[in-house]
């Protein structure tokens, strides 16, 4: 099936949707469709800036094999009567071809210096434009194909820098001793959408509600399940949207152990329609007003689809990096969204006690070199023989002088047991300092009582 036949499978309205997306991709501004009834020969309106001056463009879409002179003449009149404070011009776009009289009429307007020139774009021109902007002629829509991503790591440091930074808070382990973490990056599709909402709601008493604002939002563009991003992730994308780099899978495969690029899987039209629906919901409100008869009324004000103009749909990839550090019996994940040196942490398995799950960077954690665990203060002890940290999860224990002692293993416990047997009684007592302190305090109390009894105090 040829390109022309594939485009011809579209309905007239679908073709207008397609052309709207084409012009938005080409960089025109304020691209919007006219109402689909009584459009007065104006299917699409948009604007361009030439030498600092804003100019309106009125587009007529003809989904036919042949376009003749009358269509071009009609558009010329529609441009001349279009309400715009500034220069104007027109375009006719077709999947087919223009007749010789149509071409001659457009050429005569240009040669005469007419203030409302008409540009003609036929099926051949449309296919060339499609090649330039990545138009998928199979379904007649613009599949989002993006080659730009926020940076998955700080270009001034190596990829493991975030892991080393996280481990600096952990006692008893040097970052220089850390093994290289396993690392993978998933490039998640994101679109940044800007849209204008202009709506006026009137009743017999006049205007009761007005909307005139620009909305911008960041969308996690999961196929079939787009979701508006909030908070720190949204700010990460917005603040770094211009700090992008080429999404070169081969180059990133030399840095990461695994690389996965998720497809957008939808078209610009899909995201535009989704955004318009969300904006209509967002701006729908109930207004209370007083009528001419002094009766109070309520009215639900919901913007029409035509009240919302999507100005731009900008795709970019957001790197989701997951790095796992293996220490002893344990694996510590660190997952974050990255934008060069900036990042938003999704999961921090480093600042988490393996015994009880206590997590958070405000807690002091200690590394147990015996088993490789990271522990909160409630689950870390001092090993009696070595004098270094050992966790309650792997330590072997035994009570000496009525107090529990912690050891790396049975060998260390046996070594201390032998030493304990050889200790003088006062040294054994010192193995339970609270008990010794209590005994000293009790002795002092007895002495004070005795001295009081004989009248010496």
Image (spheres, grey):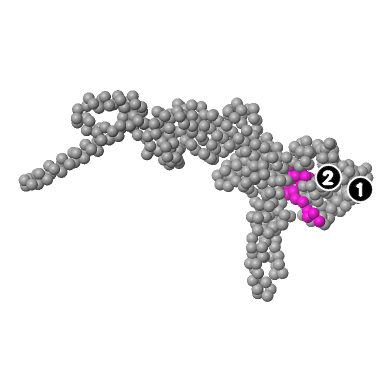
Q: Is residue 269 magenta?
A: no
Residue 25 is left or right of residue 6, and the answer is: left
Counting from the top left corner in percent of width and height, residue 402 is at 25, 35
Counting from the top left corner in percent of width and height, residue 404 is at 30, 34
Q: Residues within 10 Å of mark 1 (few under 14, many from 20)?
A: some
Which is nearer the N-term, disc 1 or disc 2? 1
- Which residue is the site of mark 2? 93
Residue 408 is left or right of residue 177, and the answer is: left
Residue 422 is left or right of residue 256, and the answer is: left
Quadrant of residue 182 within the rendered picture: top right
Which residue: 60% across, 40% down?
Answer: 240
Which residue: 60% across, 46% down?
Answer: 229
Quadrant of residue 9 within the rendered picture: top right
In this rendering, the answer to whether 196 lies above or below 256 is: below
**Element carrying mark 1:** helix
Counting from the top left corner in percent of width and height, residue 448 is at 12, 44
Q: Is residue 28 magenta?
A: yes
In this rendering, the answer to whether 203 lies above or below 357 is: below
In this rendering, the answer to whether 204 lies above or below 71 is: below
Which residue: 67% across, 48% down?
Answer: 194
Q: Is residue 452 visible?
A: yes
Q: Which mark is residue 52?
A: none
**Element carrying mark 2:** strand
Kindly indicate whether the residue at mark 2 contacts the one at mark 1 (C-beta within 8 angstroms). no
- Which residue is the site of mark 1? 69
Quadrant of residue 358 within the rendered picture: top left
Instruction: Point out the stretch of residues depicted in magenta.
Output: 18-37
Q: Is residue 111 visible?
A: no
Figure label count: 2
Which residue: 55% across, 30% down?
Answer: 183
């Amino acid at each position: 099936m040829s390109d022309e036949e594939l485009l011809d499978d579209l309905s007239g309205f679908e073709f207008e949707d397609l052309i709207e997306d084409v012009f938005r991709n080409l960089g025109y501004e304020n691209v919007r469709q006219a109402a689909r009834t009584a459009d007065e020969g104006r299917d699409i309106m948009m604007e361009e800036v030439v030498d600092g001056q804003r100019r309106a463009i009125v587009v007529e879409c003809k989904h036919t094999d042949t376009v003749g002179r009358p269509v071009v003449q009609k558009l010329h009149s529609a441009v001349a009567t279009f309400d715009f404070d500034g220069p104007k011009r027109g375009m006719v776009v077709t999947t087919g071809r223009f007749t010789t009289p149509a071409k001659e009429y457009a050429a005569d307007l240009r040669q005469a210096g007419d203030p409302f020139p008409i540009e003609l774009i036929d099926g051949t021109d449309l296919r060339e434009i499609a090649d330039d902007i990545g138009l998928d002629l199979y379904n007649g829509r613009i599949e989002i194909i993006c080659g730009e991503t926020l940076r998955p790591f700080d270009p001034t440091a190596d990829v493991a820098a975030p892991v080393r930074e996280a481990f600096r808070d952990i006692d008893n382990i040097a970052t220089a001793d850390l093994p290289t973490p396993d690392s993978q990056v998933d490039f998640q599709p994101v679109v940044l959408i800007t849209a204008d909402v202009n709506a006026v709601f009137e009743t017999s008493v006049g205007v009761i509600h007005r909307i005139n604002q620009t909305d911008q939002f960041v969308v996690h563009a999961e196929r079939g399940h787009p979701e508006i991003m909030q908070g720190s992730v949204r700010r990460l994308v917005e603040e770094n949207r211009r700090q992008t780099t080429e999404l070169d899978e081969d180059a990133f495969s030399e840095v990461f152990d695994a690389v996965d690029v998720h497809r957008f899987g939808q078209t610009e039209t899909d995201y535009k329609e989704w955004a318009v629906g969300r904006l209509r919901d967002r701006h729908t409100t109930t207004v209370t007003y007083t009528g001419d008869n002094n009766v109070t009324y309520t009215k639900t004000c919901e913007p029409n689809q035509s009240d919302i103009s999507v100005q731009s749909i900008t795709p970019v990839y957001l790197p989701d990096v997951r790095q796992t550090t293996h220490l002893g019996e344990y694996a510590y994940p660190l997952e974050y969204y990255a934008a060069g040196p900036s990042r938003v942490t999704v999961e921090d398995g480093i600042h988490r006690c393996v015994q009880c799950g206590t997590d958070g960077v405000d807690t002091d954690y200690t590394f147990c070199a015996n088993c490789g665990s990271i522990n909160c203060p409630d689950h870390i002890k001092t090993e009696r023989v070595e004098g270094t940290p050992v966790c309650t999860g792997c330590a072997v224990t035994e009570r000496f002088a009525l107090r529990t002692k912690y050891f790396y293993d049975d060998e260390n416990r046996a070594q201390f047991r032998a030493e304990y047997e050889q200790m003088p009684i006062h040294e054994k007592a010192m193995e339970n300092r609270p008990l010794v302190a209590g005994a000293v305090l009790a002795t002092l109390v007895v002495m004070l009582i005795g001295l009081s009894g004989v009248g010496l105090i």
